Image (spheres, rainbow, N blue to C red):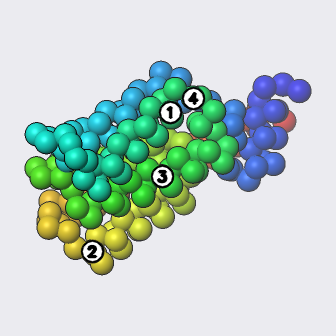
Amino acid sequence: MTTAKAAATRYTCTRGRATASERSLVPHTWRLGLAGSRALLAVAFLFAEQHPLWFPLTGRGLFYAAFVIYSLIALSTRRLEDGAYALLRLVLDVIFFLICASGPPDHGGWLTTLLFLFLMVTATLFHDWREVTIIFGLTLLFLWVTAPDEVPFLWLAIVTLGLLSLIFSLHKRLLKERLAMASRQAVM
């Protein structure tokens, strides 16, 4: 089976959902960079929460420490990149973001914005437009219900980044459909 025919068959059989081979189109260095970014953000949140007193750890400090450990494990294992683990990783990142957005560390509002940027970039690259829409809607609903102190700043950043991610993920879907159609036409 030719490469174009295999790609067209794979796309048709999965109804446009990303398969493991399609996810591998994102270079490994990008995956490492994103995993490293998650770890750096987790360490930055831990540092912002606990600085200058490192002991005793606060409740949020323990949560941030757990997220640092998870980030380092995700950075060191490639197995968490595909399949059901990718969705689990996305869910954990969303939970971490929502907890951080509900009460960011002192002077840590910008970290929350960077975390949302990271979340939307990973969702756009590795997931379908539906997941991006769910994350964006869940975040807006959460901020509307909880109304953290830094709402004006967060609202602007989240709406802007969320809409851009939604546009990019829809464009990615359109490009995948065009590629599949071109692959099918090349086979015929």
Q: Amino acid at mark 2?
A: Thr
Q: Specify the farthest residue to the right.
A: 1
Separation (CA) of disc 1 from disc 2: 31 Å
Residue 92: mark: 3
Q: Position of residue 101 (x, y in %)?
A: 27, 60
CB atoms of marks 4 and 1 within 8 Å: yes
Label 2 belongs to which residue? Answer: 146
Q: Specify the farthest residue to the bottom.
A: 145
Give neighbour class at mark 1: few <14, some 14-19, many 20+ (Cα, 10 Å): some
The mark nearer the N terminus, 4 or 3, is 4
Left or right of 114 in this view: 51: left
Q: Amino acid at mark 3?
A: Leu
Residue 77: mark: 4
The mark nearer the N terminus, 2 or 4, is 4
Q: Position of residue 63 (x, y in %)?
A: 35, 51
Determine whether 2 is above or below 101 in the image: above
Residue under the image location 78 percent in, 41 percent down = 10
Q: Specify the farthest residue to the front.
A: 56
Which image quadrant for residue 53?
Answer: top left
Separation (CA) of disc 3 from disc 2: 19 Å
